[in-house]
Image (cartoon, grey):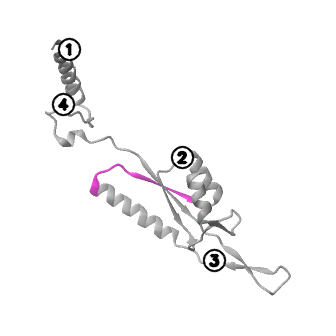
Amino acid sequence: SNLLSSAAASIETVSLESRSSMYQRYDPLMTNLDIDDRKPPPRSDKLTVFQAAPLVYRANCTDGDRGWKYVPIEMLDFEREREVLTGAFRDARERLRRAEIELVFETATTERFNAVLAARDAQAIHFTCHASAEYLCLEDGRGEEHLLKVGDLTDLMTG
């Protein structure tokens, strides 16, 4: 009985002290607080957007000495995508009154992708690139395409 009343007094003291803070930790014994007073603290989430814009790919050909030629690749509208993503997350933050999601834009090379995975620095990853059912078309760092097999992507993500 003494232990119980001492615990109740401690809870009341903690309850009164913590009411002054902006965010409350949920405690089922605290009955004098409104639901809104028990919001979790804001978190900082991060979405890493990998964008690939290789300039050319090598195509087989019968002309010339090399047996292949460079073919230009259509550019994607990265600026428009940045505007859409930034606007969508800003609108969601305002409507949901949630913490901001940090958007980080990276060049989509396997080196940068591996570095982000190794650092465990992103909660979500998005790719903007040309692709097929079997490959993502990343950059090689020299302006050419680097085809990343979907199976290799899966191995990188789970390994």
Q: CA distance from mark 3 to mark 2?
A: 31 Å
For the point 38% across and 44% down, which residue is it? 43
Q: Which residue is denoted by mark 3 in the rendering?
A: 73
Q: CA distance from mark 2 to mark 4?
A: 37 Å
Q: What crowding class fits label 2: few (fewer than 14 Cα within 10 Å), some (14-19), or many (20 or more)?
A: few
Decide if residue 152 is on the left or right side of residue 30: right
Counting from the top left corner in percent of width and height, residue 108 is at 60, 61
Q: Is residue 69 magenta?
A: no
Q: Is residue 105 magenta?
A: yes
Counting from the top left corner in percent of width and height, residue 9 is at 18, 19
**Residue type, mark 3 in image:** Ile
Q: Which residue is denoted by mark 1 in the rendering?
A: 3
Q: Quadrant of residue 52?
A: bottom right
Q: Which residue is denoted by mark 4 in the rendering?
A: 29
Counting from the top left corner in percent of width and height, residue 27 is at 23, 33
For residue 120, the mark is 2
